[in-house]
Amino acid sequence: MASLKTVLYLGVCLSVWIITTADKNFVPAAEEVHWISLDFKTTLFWTTKASKYTYTVKYFSDDHDWMESLDCIRVSHSECDLSNSLRPFDRSYYADILTEPATMDHDYDLDEFPHTYSPHFNPYRETNISAVKFTVEVVDESRVIVNITDPLTSIHERGKQLSIRDILKSDLKYKISYYKSGSTGKRDIMSDSSTAVVSGLDAGQSYCFMVAAFIPSRPQTTQNGAWSTQRCTNGHIMQELSLGAWVGVVFILLIVLIIIITVTVLCCRCCRRRNKTLHTSQSSAPV
Ligand SMILES: *[C@@H]1O[C@H](CO)[C@@H](O)[C@H](O)[C@H]1NC(C)=O
Ligand SMILES: *[C@@H]1O[C@H](CO)[C@@H](O)[C@H](O)[C@H]1NC(C)=O
């Protein structure tokens, strides 16, 4: 009986030992590590199989030692915003995600836990550029001004929120694509600045415009920003007038009308008086 007890006891001990070791050995590594970056807001994402772990992110560039992102030490979510850490922008970075148990005993050795490396990422060359907002102002019958608002980034410097122009500077161009309403032929022009004059338009025609950021210095796959929605002009310049201009036009018309009426009334009075004088002089003249 005593020996059976010992065997049972041993068995229990063994299984506990196996379970504990197994638990330690199967700490899940972060998986599907990938970057998502839009207008220089750059976030590292990963997936996890279990919820009782935390993650610490370190990042490296080729010519620097590793650094820790202060916002991503022992976090329980599976993302890390590195927008403000990956500086300078034009460097290739990679990150390392370490998995740790949420309740960490001091005798744990960090080297026991799995970690996963991310793919390389260069914010300057690979961040996606969002669709821009722009206005089209008619200058005259054959010209318009396309006025583009540079998208803002999530990068702040000296209290100012930087735009993509502040970072990309003269590397940033815009592609303006336009077509005459009802025709299929599209024309493209490239603009170095955020304000472009498009000329050579046909008078009285309606045109539609679309704009996208374009960065020729980048590798071909990341040169194009997203296309904006299109904006069209009305065919007739009159319809381009703003409410203010319309009020002005009505005002001028009113004044002209008043002048015409006044002049007519004055003239009539004048004529009548002259007619009367003529009459009087005629009748009083000796025959
Ligand atoms: C940029 O956008 C493309 C297309 O939507 C997407 O496939 C890619 O993952 C994005 N890249 C980054 C770094 O966010
Ligand atoms: C372009 O638009 C911005 C604001 O949207 C305005 O401040 C600026 O004066 C405009 N520029 C031109 C040339 O119309």
Image (cartoon, rainbow, N blue to C red):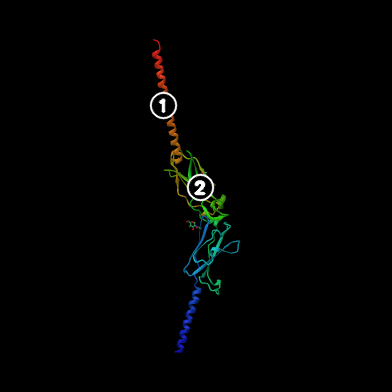
Residue identifier under label 2: 148
Residue at screen point 47% across, 84% down: 9
Q: Nearest the camera: 220 or 6?
A: 6
Task: Quadrant for residue 71, please give it.
Answer: bottom right
Instruction: Left or right? Give the position of 268 relative to 121.
Output: left
Residue at screen point 50% across, 47% down: 148
Q: Look at label 1 and name its amino acid.
A: Val
Secondary structure of residue under mark 1:
helix
Task: Quadrant for residue 284, please give it.
Answer: top left
The answer to whether residue 237 is visible is: no
Residue count near mark 2 (Cα–Cα under 10 Å), binned few <14, some 14–19, many ≥20: some
Q: Nearest the camera: 283 or 172?
A: 283
Is 60 rendered above or below residue 19?
Answer: above
Residue count near mark 1 (Cα–Cα under 10 Å), binned few <14, some 14–19, many ≥20: few
Q: CB of mark 2 within 8 Å of CB of mark 1?
A: no
Nearer mark to the viewer, of 2 and 1: 1
Q: Nearest the camera: 99 or 157?
A: 157
Residue identifier under label 1: 265
Q: Look at label 2 and name its amino acid.
A: Ile
x and y percentages locating residue 235 in the rendered image: 43, 40
x and y percentages locating residue 242 in the rendered image: 45, 41
x and y percentages locating residue 157 in the rendered image: 57, 55
x and y percentages locating residue 42 in the rendered image: 52, 58
